[in-house]
Amino acid sequence: MRDRPRYLVPGLAAFFALLATVAVGPSSIPVAAGHPDRTSHAAARSATPGLSGAQTSRSPAPGLAIPRSAKFSLPVAAQLDSHKSNVAPLTRLKPADLLVVAPDALPGRVLAKAQRLRGVTAAQTLDAARVRVNGSYAAILGVDPSAFRPYAARPTAASDKLWQSVASGAMAVSYTMGRLDKLPLGGEVEVAGAKQEKIRVGSFATVGITGVDAVVSDSVARSLGFPIGNAIVISAPHANLSHLAAEVKRLLPRAAAVEPLVSQEGSPGRAGVTAASATSSAYPQLTGSQLITMLRAALSKRGRPYVWGGNGPDVFDCSGLVKWSFAQAGIVMPRVAADQALTGPAIPLSKAAAGDLLFYHTDPTDPGYVSHVAIYLGHGLMIQAPEPGLDVEVVPVALGPEFAGVVRVDPRLASSVAASVG
């Protein structure tokens, strides 16, 4: 089939609920599924933009306990000397197209059969779980650095130093997790897996798989109590992914799931907001009453504090402010900024009007990903929830290199996107 544009799919929080939660103690503490994108930044201040994240609770919620079959190996500290830091050089990238996740180890036959499916060019098993990092839950992959690096985003995949660091026992953390959770680059963090471990933060780098906060070596993952081989990443750059996902699903145990990591239809969620093929006149706009109600709601929260994952009515992150403000006008919006970028046609900046959404890139390790949103007020001003330590503010529209574009919200499409991503 003819290749079509491919973009990361941001709405995978429910899918990552399948990750086992590994916690210190005789029984695991359940936790909510997935983090927000960890990316609400001040577009007007940052030279490197990013998108606000999906709602995530830092407090325990229903989840999956560590499987009894999980095996533990040497403590992390004991592995630093034994780890071989030689990592195979990157030869070619293998786009990460599908991800399989199960709460426990997958049968070995699943990988072998998946590799033989039509359109599959490569597949690799992974260890995956949620653990506490300095007190906050994070979705982490345990990988063979040599085998996994081709599946990562290009800048990350190309860094020999990064993967050698992972191979020697360090953790590669997403830029936004590192910044928002104030993790010490080069320092140690407390990781509460099956045992309490101290692990060095070797780098800040986006893996390129939405929902994944960090990567460690498979040896470190098993020391932390991750289930062994409970995930598979699949590369199938020329396949119809919806059809392929259905075929893979038939190979899996009932508790496992498979999801596309990219969309084969053009969308602004990954590569920035680009001109839509449909004109804005083809989409119903907000009514005058809805527009006024939404804008008044947003402005009423000026001065309220930014809190990562905040949904209002008293604290907000960037996409939380958008979702709450539109909700006051009866419009259902998805939670994550990258999903909010899919809620209407992209329009030229010259046509922007009050109520349109402005999107930005803020993650320097994945500069193509939309990760911050603001509401345009007209007259060159926008309102945003900027970043930790700052309040909801009205500022001039930022039009630096981080600017991704403008979207005019279509309430029907917004509701559809919200429903599709849960």
Image: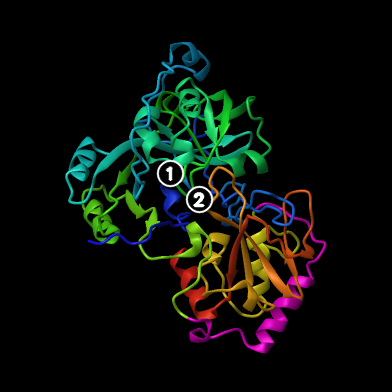
Question: Where is residue 61 drawn, in percent x and y?
Answer: 55, 50
For label 1, the SS is: loop
- Tell me where the magenta segment starts and ends, as one range: 279-308
Q: Farthest residue in the right direction?
A: 303
Q: What type is the residue that disc 2 sits on?
A: Ala
Q: What is the image's colouring?
A: rainbow
For the point 68% across and 69% down, which residue is it? 375
Disc 1 to disc 2, how far (Cα)?
A: 8 Å
- 280 within the magenta span: yes
Total marks shown come to 2
Query: In the image, is 382 to the left or to the right of 407?
Result: right
Q: Reading the chain from its start, which is encountered first: label 1 or label 2? A: 1
Residue 140 visible to the viewer = no
For the point 42% across and 26% down, which residue is it? 222
Q: Quadrant of the N terminus?
A: bottom left
**Above/below status of 402 relative to 342:** above
Question: Where is residue 194 drawn, in percent x and y?
Answer: 49, 28
Question: Where is residue 152 drawn, in percent x and y?
Answer: 42, 40
Residue at which label 1 appears? 19
Residue at which label 2 appears? 33
Front residue (pair 88, 79) = 88
Q: What type is the residue that disc 1 sits on?
A: Leu
Q: Are marks 1 and 2 in contact (CB under 8 Å)?
A: yes
Question: Where is residue 330 drawn, in percent x and y?
Answer: 62, 80
What crowding class fits label 1: few (fewer than 14 Cα within 10 Å), some (14-19), or many (20 or more)? many
Residue 69 bears which disc, if any? none
- 57 within the magenta span: no
Residue 168 visible to the viewer = yes
**Above/below status of 257 relative to 267:** above
